[in-house]
Amino acid sequence: MSDRKTGRNADGTFGLGNSGKPKGTRHKATLAAMALLDGEAESLSRKAVELALEGDTTALRLCLERIAPPRKDAPVTFDLPPMQSAADAAKAAGAVLNAVADGDLTPTEGAHIMALVETYRRTLETSSLEARVLALEADSHV
């Protein structure tokens, strides 16, 4: 059992999930590196650009990644039928599978879109069930 105030166990060690440092505390090595670099960002950036312009591929990659970071995802365009019911969601899932099979979407893109279709289908299903329950409750109070 740990003491709530100190977060320590009876033997003096810190309890599970408590490293003993306040939230947001930085590691000593991080603080030392920040102190060394303090005020040098502009000159270091200039040097990286100079090295990149001289042909240093590592410096070039570093500079380019800062200018235009790699995209995590990109918009996709393909025909997806409108969805108003679970049956429509099944048609949309079929359209996604066809797009993957035809090479219009990557399997990863298809999986992400299928997850969206499934979430929307569950939302439609929940809305439909809610409407039916409300209608039954209204009928039972008459």
Image (cartoon, helix red, strand yellow):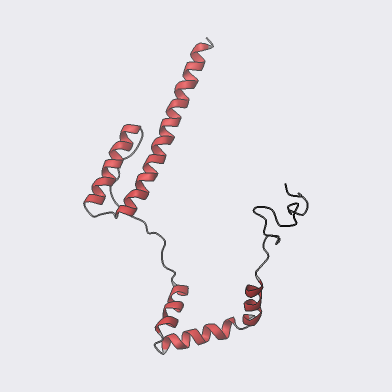
Q: Residue at x 26, y 41 (%)?
A: 94
Q: Position of residue 104 (x, y in %)?
A: 25, 54
Q: Residue at x 31, y 35 (%)?
A: 88
Q: Position of residue 25 (x, y in %)?
A: 68, 65
Q: Position of residue 139 (x, y in %)?
A: 49, 13
**In this picture, residue 13 sits left or right of residue 90:** right
**In this picture, residue 53 sits left or right of residue 82:** right
Q: Which of the pair 11/47 is nearer the observer?
A: 11
Q: Residue at x 58, y 81 (%)?
A: 41
Q: Residue at x 32, y 50 (%)?
A: 110
Outermost residue, right direction?
Answer: 5
Classify 55 as above or below 66. below
Q: Position of residue 84 (x, y in %)?
A: 36, 34
Outermost residue, left direction?
Answer: 102
**In this picture, residue 49 sits left or right of residue 35:** left
Q: Quadrant of residue 114?
A: top left
